[in-house]
Amino acid sequence: MSGQRAKKSLGQHFLADRRYLAPILEAATLAPDDRVLEIGPGQGVLTEALVEQVKCLVAVELDDRLIEPLRQQFAGQANVHIVHGDILEHAPAQLVASACWTEDEIKRLGDWRLEIGDSQSAPSSPNPPISPSPNLQSPNLQSPNLQSPNLQSPNLQSPNLQSPNLQSPISYKVVANLPYYITSAVLRHLLEAAPPPALAVLMVQWEVAQRICAAPGEMSLLAVSVQFYAAPRIVARVPAAAFRPRPKVDSAILHLEVRAQPAVDIEAARFFSVVRAGFSQKRKQLHNSLAAGLNLDKAAVHQWLSAAGVTPTRRAETLSLAEWGELCQHAPCA
């Protein structure tokens, strides 16, 4: 499917250079039994490559003009399920389980349940929104307009997925050309999903990928937020010329290996309340940012930082995740 023009109102930029399919597929380490969620299939270029390598593929597309062409293109392939909707409105694991798991497999899930219920929105969390640079063009950009899904799949009973305290037997991967302006929302939606994907291979803005993979000294709220949940690495840089129409910026193939447990053994609400306060005042020393962000007396903050072994005059971008965890352990009010 190549005749459909990009929709300016959605800021669409379709991947045209097929040479970049190989590093995407290699990074995803696909196996014949894999279940994969693709976000924004667009004209189906990546979808064609994915479907040949996996057991089941669920492709979620918001643009209503692309749904019927996609369904016609993959009509003869039973392992492809085209969903018309906004990924931010639907639990990723629910989409994959409903389309990709047989009745026998669902029965074998036993007592395991995934906490979804009737709610299809992203779980509530104190994790602050990840904020990449706004107003940039994006490959296969999707608008935040919300639409109900139209899932074409066998008539299977959807698993009633409930307790995040048990080990999930549902495993899936995500491959996506992410819209730049909703990168933060999609990352949060995926990483906080119950369960999250085992790994994600995402096309994002080059500068945002660099920020996500930053080391202490150049950390940001974005880097801390993503690295709390996953180990990121940049696979390759993708030039703007690889897309049609051409965006203004380069992209990156970003690999996220989602951690079985967060990198820091601290409850998320406690962790992010401290981190958010630490980054609340750019270019300020940590003792000033924490005092202002948490409404604490500076003397109390100095005592807190000393107990955690962190020099008060350091800045938030210099702290490692382990040091943020140590701060949270000694936090007086978080």
Image: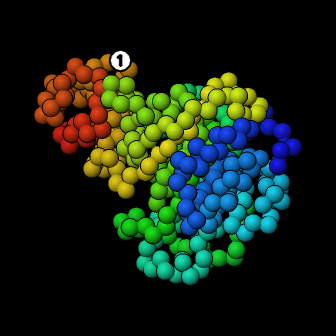
Crowdedness near tag 1: few (<14), some (14–19) or many (≥20) residues, C-alpha within 10 Å: few
Residue at the location (12% across, 34% down)?
A: 307
**Above or below, comparing residue 334 to residue 107 in the picture:** above
**Above or below, comparing residue 102 to residue 181 in the picture:** below
Q: Nearer the viewer, residue 204 or 274?
A: 204
Q: Amino acid at mark 1?
A: Arg
Indicate the secondary structure of the residue bearing disc 1.
loop
Q: Is residue 111 left or right of residue 59?
A: left
Query: In the rendered image, which quarter is residue 290 located in?
Result: top left
Q: Nearer the viewer, residue 329 or 48?
A: 48
Q: Is residue 275 left or right of residue 313?
A: right
Q: Position of residue 43 (x, y in %)?
A: 77, 47
**Above or below, comparing residue 332 to residue 114 in the picture:** above
Residue 252 visible in the displayed image: yes
Q: Nearer the viewer, residue 286 or 243?
A: 243
The colour style of the image is: rainbow
Q: Quadrant of the C terminus?
A: top left
Query: In the rendered image, which quarter is residue 332 located in?
Result: top left
Residue at the location (30% across, 50% down)?
A: 267
Q: Position of residue 284 (x, y in %)?
A: 32, 18
In the rendered picture of this protein, how many numbered marks are placed on residues?
Answer: 1
Residue at the location (28% across, 19% down)?
A: 285
**Above or below, comparing residue 221 to residue 56 in the picture:** above
Q: Position of residue 156 (x, y in %)?
A: 65, 76
Q: Is residue 120 left or right of residue 316?
A: right
Residue 13 visible in the displayed image: no
Q: Position of residue 286 (x, y in %)?
A: 27, 24
In the image, farthest residue toward the right? 3
Q: Is residue 104 left or right of residue 148?
A: left
Instruction: Name the residue beneath numbered marker 1.
Output: 283
Residue at the location (80% across, 64% down)?
A: 75
